[in-house]
Amino acid sequence: MADTDEKPLDPVAEMILSTLSRLEEGELMSPENLAKAVAEFKRKPKDGPQLWRRYFNATKQQAIFLARQGKVEIIRKGEVADPNDLKGLWKVRIAK
C-alpha cells in the first residue's frame, strides 16, 4: 500500500472545488451561494426552491475542511481567516 493513498473527497467538497475553479482569479463566493450550486447539481424535479438550505451546513463544514487542507482560502474582512476560529460572515476562494 502506498503512502500517497488519500481518501476520496466528500461529494460536497468536490462540488465546492468544481464551482470555485470556474470563478475568475480572486473572485469570492459565499457559503450560501456554494450551497445553492450544490443544491442545483443534486436537484430532483420535485425539489422546492429552498433545497439549498438542506446543503448549507454540509457546505460550510466542507469549505472549512478544504481550508484546513490548504485547497481553499476563507476570507473575512478582506483577509485570509483561520478556519479554526471563524466568526461572522465569510467567503471562500481557491487557494493562491
Image (cartoon, rainbow, N blue to C red):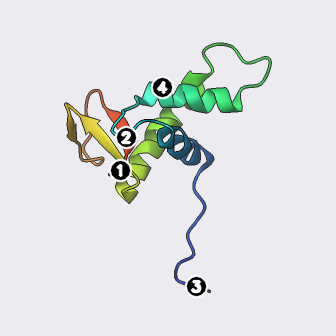
| Tag 2: amino acid | Glu
Q: Residue at x 53, y 38 (%)?
A: 19
Amino acid residing under circle 3: Ala
Mark 1 residue type = Ala
Name the residue at the top extreme.
Answer: 49
Q: Is residue 93 left or right of residue 22?
A: left
Mark toward the start of the polypeptide (3 vs 4): 3
Relative depth, front residue between 67 and 54: 67
Of badges 2 and 4, nearer the viewer stands 2
Mark 3 or mark 2, which is nearer to you? 2
- For mark 3, give the secondary structure: loop
Q: Which mark is residue 25?
A: 2
Secondary structure of the residue carrying tag 1 is loop
- The residue carrying mark 1 is 95
Q: Quadrant of residue 9?
A: bottom right
Q: Residues within 10 Å of mark 3 (few under 14, many from 20)?
A: few
